[in-house]
Image: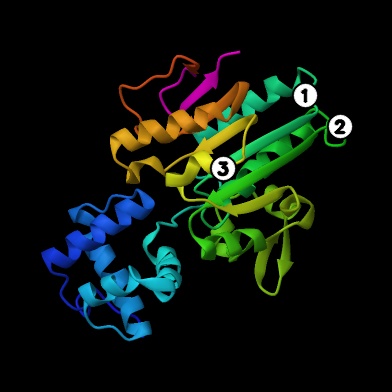
Amino acid sequence: MAVSVNQAPDLSDAAYASWQDTIEERLGLQLPEHRRSFLKTCLAIRMREVGFDDYLTYHQFVLQGDAGFIEWNQLIDRITVQETRFFRDPAALSLVKDFLARRLKKDVSALSLWSVGCSSGEEVYSLAILVEEVLAKYELSSDVRYGITGTDVSKKGLIAAAEGKYHPRRLETLDSRLVDRYFDEVAGYKQVVQSTRERACFVRLNLLELARSPLKNLDVIYCQNVLIYFRKWRRKDIVSELASRLKPGGMLVLGLGEMVDWSLPELTRVPGERALAYIKRK
């Protein structure tokens, strides 16, 4: 049975502060006051499932021992935001499309892309479709190899992403031509065709441990609607680390408004008011 905000036990200021501190310490994510009800509901649902009725008692359990570690990893799936959709930001994807077209004209034989905070995979497959459409336009599908890595902290989201199966309602905004070309009908669902799924891999990654990632020399790093959940100083650290993973001439795409009054000497802002992207200087 679902638990509504009104049905959930009261989340005291002390309990709220304790959970805020732990979530930021372990994931880097901020949960400001306007997201208090979201946290309350997420915790209450999970507490009901595992037999707790007090937020602080449950908090202490999560912090202790192997059982707490396992429970924390279950809880991550509840408290990390997984709102996404196919071709969510047309303006940003248009920049990527133009960038790929220019890059392919330089006899590039391989492309590597990274979707940061990929959730259930819609962003990864949007990028894959974009790449394949560009390759088809220039008749390079058999000449250029490409791969896309999707990373997220949510194991549940990554499992769904790897499966690539979606309710038809999730595809309603897609051009019917793209649906017909890139999705198969599977038991009432739409699944990304195998040839496209094989171009994607999905890896669990906590952005606080970004420096440990082996990903490097990327043509495109797509990191949208992720940084807004981090403090400003942490955003700068994350973006600096992402920039170091780009190839010279590679593109970094961020969410509009996520980075203000910020610059890196090795990055040049791509002109445009409807999307935020940078090119790494050669």
Q: Does the magenta stretch include residue 151?
A: no
Crowding around mark 2 (Cα neighbors within 10 Å: few <14, some 14 to 19, many 20+) is few
Residue 33 percent location from the top left of the image? 18, 55
Q: Is residue 160 left or right of residue 15?
A: right
Q: Is residue 36 left or right of residue 229?
A: left
Task: Answer with the quarter of the image where residue 218 lies.
Answer: top right
Q: In this view, does 91 lie above or below 68?
A: above
For residue 89, say whether it is visible: no
For residue 172, say whether it is visible: yes
Residue 225 percent location from the top left of the image? 41, 43
Q: Which of 66 and 189 is in front in this view?
A: 66
Q: In this view, does 256 lie above or below 184?
A: above
Q: Check disc 3 and report its element: helix, strand or loop.
A: loop
In the rendered structure, find residue 213 and report the number of the disc placed on it.
3
The residue located at (35%, 30%) in the rendering is 259
Disc 3 to disc 1, C-alpha distance: 25 Å
Residue 89 percent location from the top left of the image? 49, 40
Which callout, 2 or 3, points at the residue further toward the start of the chain? 2
Magenta extent = 269-282
Q: Does the magenta stretch include residue 274?
A: yes
Residue highlighted by disc 2: 143
Crowding around mark 1 (Cα neighbors within 10 Å: few <14, some 14 to 19, many 20+) is few
